[in-house]
Amino acid sequence: MSVALVTGSGGLIGSEAARHFAGLGLDVVGIDNDMRRQFFGDEASTAWNVLRLTSDLSGAYTHHDVDIRDRDALGKIFQRYGRDIALVVHTAAQPSHDWAVRDPYTDFDVNAVGTLNVLQNVREHCIEAPVIHCSTNKVYGDRPNSLPLVEQATRWEIEAGHPYEQGIAEDMSIDACLHSIFGASKVAADVMVQEYGRYFDMRTACFRGGTLTGPAHSATELHGFLGYVMRCNMERRTYKIFGYQGKMVRDAIHSHDVVSAFEAFFRSPRSAAVYNLGGGRHSNCSHLEAFALAEKITGVEMRSEYHEANRVGDHKWWIGSNAAFERDYPDWKQAYDVPMILQEIYEANVGKWVPRP
């Protein structure tokens, strides 16, 4: 028996990873306690996704309602499967800047300490298993805002000819900048994953994601950019824009493209690898551009309101470079761009996201 252990298996990337690796013939062990519901409320619950996984994957999926902060419970799961664990995909996290400020203890305990708990269990029970960690571009703090940016009609854009014109690389410093509380906890996790790779010669990878997206996202205001744009349009909600004239740029990568990158690493793992992974120049948009695309898909005008103050540490422009990953894994290709992503989100939710009475 070969097992893929997936933390945060009810979430966007976790559930996509569960399906993907089950499709490759691995037995999937999912760990998720629906803490997203505690973070963001009932509409952000991932319980529906866990039910769907359990139904669709049948005997290939085993679910554990366990908190990654619970060392004893987590240890029992790793001990049970031991060296049958062929892969660990760690997606469980507290994902919001805003939420982290309200409860820094929980944020750090989930993101940093929870990651340490996963790593130590891999070291003790299945040290040969590759560990894939979902990090974030927020480990760079607000450093990207120091880049020379030019305001255009619908977006901010980097100055032509800059070394990062095709996307920000992993050589950008994470020091001497503002990270947000969330960013700091993710830095701690990111560095610990690298350290276990180097210090214990484990096969680990930090994937510093841009905007991860797809139809399995439980989109809510504080998390899930493109999903929440489409949800607001379809349900006739008002989308709140925070700063930068709504021209802040995000690169967006579909969950399918993310887990295909995970598979490439699983098949040929490295030690202490660090990769930016996002939409890159292939798939990116500003808020204003996303609004226009949503309106084109539905024929319905977006409702929005503008707040001058930007969120602390928020990026004015982020387009990451996938060049490092593509050099190591040249067969990996992106399938989705922003218009395709929004169209798929719309089609997946057309019967569910309807105007409220």
Image: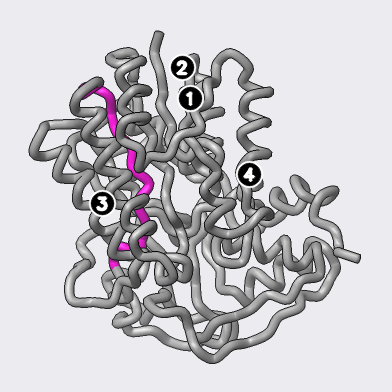
Disc 1 residue crowd, few under 14, some 14–19, many 20+, Cα 10 Å: many
Q: What residue does disc 2 label?
A: 26
Q: Identify the residue at image location x=28%, y=29%.
A: 130
Q: Are marks 3 and 4 in contact (CB under 8 Å)?
A: no
User: Which of these two is toward me, 170 or 91?
Assistant: 91
Vertical side of 275 occupied by 262: above or below: above
Q: Are marks 2 and 1 in contact (CB under 8 Å)?
A: yes
Q: Give me the disc on residue 21.
A: 1
Position above or below: 245 against 193 = below
The Cα atoms of the two marked residues, 2 and 3, are separated by: 26 Å
In the image, residue 136 lies in the stretch drawn in magenta: yes
Q: Amino acid at mark 2?
A: Leu
Q: Quadrant of the N terminus?
A: top left
Question: Dot 3 corresponds to which residue?
Answer: 190
Lower sequence index among marks 2 and 1: 1
Magenta residues, start to end: 126-140
Q: Amino acid at mark 3?
A: Asp
Q: Earlier in the sequence, mark 2 or mark 3?
A: 2
Mark 4 highlights which residue? 216
The amino acid sitting under disc 4 is Ala
Which of the pair 105/284 is nearer the observer? 105
Q: Residue at x 67, y 23 (%)?
A: 56
